Amino acid sequence: MKRIIAITCTVCVLFVLAGVAAAHQKGRKSTARLAQKAVYDKANVIKKTLKYEYDAAGKRVKKLIYDKNNNLAQYHVYTYKTDGKRDKKHIYSGADVLEKYYVYVYGEQGLREKKLIYNAQDKLTAYYVYSYNAGNKRVKKDIFNTADTLQEFQTYEYNDQGRKNKKSVFDVQKKCKKYMLYEYDKQGNKVKKSVYDSEKNLLEYGLYTYETMDKAGLSK
């Protein structure tokens, strides 16, 4: 009887230790952040390449856009508020000339409510208004000109895992202009974005590449 109890206890201890080890390993699970996006036309010819840079805290601070010949065509610089929310995005040409910039506006719940678009002369040229569902998922973006006239709107749909799997673009007559479909890997990373016209013809697609991060947020 004592022998059976001893064996049983040994098995329990091993089971607990295995659980602790698994939990520890889970705690050290690597994460991934977007490193590059390559955009191709429907004939599989490269159109442009987007590369991303991050600060020490892991926040995206720069997006560089290269043309099909790998020349820098444009780059975006991101700045953040003290609470970590994105504040502004400045867009420059490859020759370092400011083209326009965005200012982000948030509501009481911390959700992005508006995006204001200014030209290089600080003149407002357009703005976006965002709408959310009961679960705080973004479901619509309305685009207005400075006369507050709706120019177009976009809708968002999500899969069972809560990930965005479709974005549709409509004109003011509610006619679909184009739509985008998104694909993900098993880890939930977006791996492909396909753009179609209203007749379901493929226009272009983008493939995403990620860099693996360790627990400290450093790339491996």
Image (tube, rainbow, N blue to C red):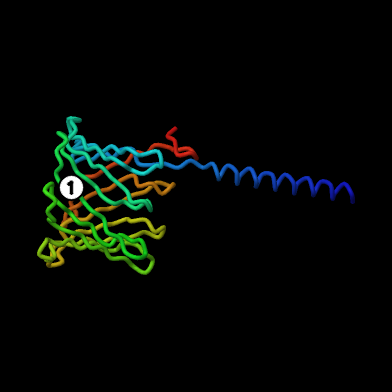
Provide residue 39's location: percent of width, then percent of height: 23, 40
Q: Nearer the viewer, residue 21 or 117?
A: 117
Above or below for 134 versus 41: below
Q: Nearer the viewer, residue 201 or 122?
A: 122
Above or below for 166 versus 80: below
Name the quadrant containing residue 50. top left
Give the residue displayed 26% in from the left and 40% down from the top. 63
Q: Nearer the viewer, residue 21 or 194?
A: 21
Name the quadrant containing residue 70. top left
Instruction: Give the quadrant of the C terminus.
Output: top left
Give the residue displayed 28% in from the left and 65% down from the top. 131
Q: Is residue 174 left or right of residue 15?
A: left
User: Dot 1, crowdedness within 10 Å: few (<14), some or many (≥20)?
Assistant: some
Q: Is residue 136 left or right of residue 217?
A: left
Give the residue displayed 37% in from the left and 69% down from the top. 134
Total labels drawn: 1
Q: Is residue 33 left or right of residue 156?
A: right
Residue under circle 1?
203
**Helix, strand or loop at mark 1:** strand
Provide residue 109's location: percent of width, then percent of height: 37, 64
Provide residue 151's location: percent of width, then percent of height: 12, 62
